[in-house]
Amino acid sequence: MKVWAGVAVLVLGFAATAEAKPRVASINICTDQLLLALADDDQIASLSAAAKSPRASFHAERAAKLDAPENFATVEEALTLRPDMVFAGAWDAPAREALTRFGVRVESFADPKSLDDVVAQLRRAGDLLDQPERAADLVAALDAARARAFARGDRGKRAVFYYSGGYTYGTGTLVDDILREVGLVNLSAVSGVEGVGRIDLETLVGDRPEVILTDDAIAKGAPRVDTQVLDHPALLRALPGAQPIRFPLRYWICGGDAATAALDFLGQRLR
């Protein structure tokens, strides 16, 4: 009887282990967002050091409240944490390769280039975290936001995203897909910019955009001409009817459920 009792304890122990949701460490700001949007608190083994940044992290407030250790994407930190798996981004190849050699399961997520990519990543992360219902809810919320964006009557305005130093976003980027979803014509894409590119001020003025978007955090944190272009007197005179919109980095850098908020954020501000 003692033997059978011991076997029963072992079986129950294995069952409990099998039912436990995985503990995951994230070593990338964008995979932080997936964890923070989908995981239970006790599933989050660690987050990157950028997770608490209100400028870049859509879920900075939740990250600040969690008692999860932060990491700097080092192999030693991930091995010490002993997570069931590690979420990594497209730029984390060295750490990813090293962790894999040590037998750590690493799941990589590329930067989303479209809202469809965002949907796929939410579903995949939900499955990996054993949170498919939560992922389905976030996908449904994104679908609803896309429907609201499509229903906007004022569509077809010419827009450009102008970032610090003249950087802009053309075809094959999440920014481009978000702009098109809310009915804007992305002039950077029309001009042939693919991915992240640059646009000079003369081209910006010559394209006559009706909407100019930039990142408000950079404009406030680095007071230079190229970061405060929307307030430049020459630009205001050249484009008197253009609508400036401060479009915070946290809405468009990573995707996840921030993309849902980005659609509503822009839809509410376009006039």
Image (cartoon, rainbow, N blue to C red):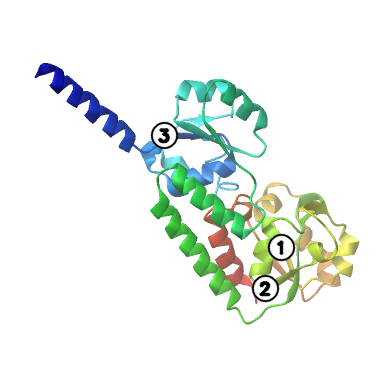
Expressed as whole percent of the image width and height from the top left, the position of residue 235 reads: 83, 66
Residue situated furthest bottom in the rendering: 153
Dot 2: element: loop
**Does residue 250 show up?**
yes
Secondary structure of the residue carrying numbered label 1 = strand
Labels 3 and 1 touching (C-beta < 8 A): no
Residue 6 falls left or right of residue 250 = left
> What is the distance, in whole Å, between disc 3 and disc 1 at their CAs?
38 Å
Percent coordinates x, y for residue 172 in the rendering: 73, 56
Q: Quadrant of residue 229?
A: bottom right
Where residue 101 appears, x then y in whole percent? 59, 21
Q: CA distance from mark 2 to mark 1?
A: 14 Å
Residue denoted by label 1: 213
Label 3: element kind: loop
Residue 61 x %, y %: 47, 47
Numbered disc in front, either 2 or 3:
3
Mark pair 2, 3: CA separation: 40 Å
Q: Residue furthest top?
A: 2
Split into 4 quadrants, where in the image is the N terminus? top left
Residue identifier under label 3: 23
Task: Examine the rendered structure and indicate whether residue 247 appears above or below residue 218.
Answer: below
**Which numbered disc flags the more N-terminal residue, 2 or 3?**
3
Look at mark 2 in the image and give the residue it sits on. 183
Compare residues 59 and 257 and report the one nearer the observer: 257
Dot 1 alpha-carbon crowd within 10 angstroms: few under 14, some 14 to 19, many 20 or more: some
- Work out whether residue 238 or residue 152 is closer to the camera in this orientation and state it: 152
Task: Check contact, mark 2 vs mark 1: CB within 8 A.
Answer: no
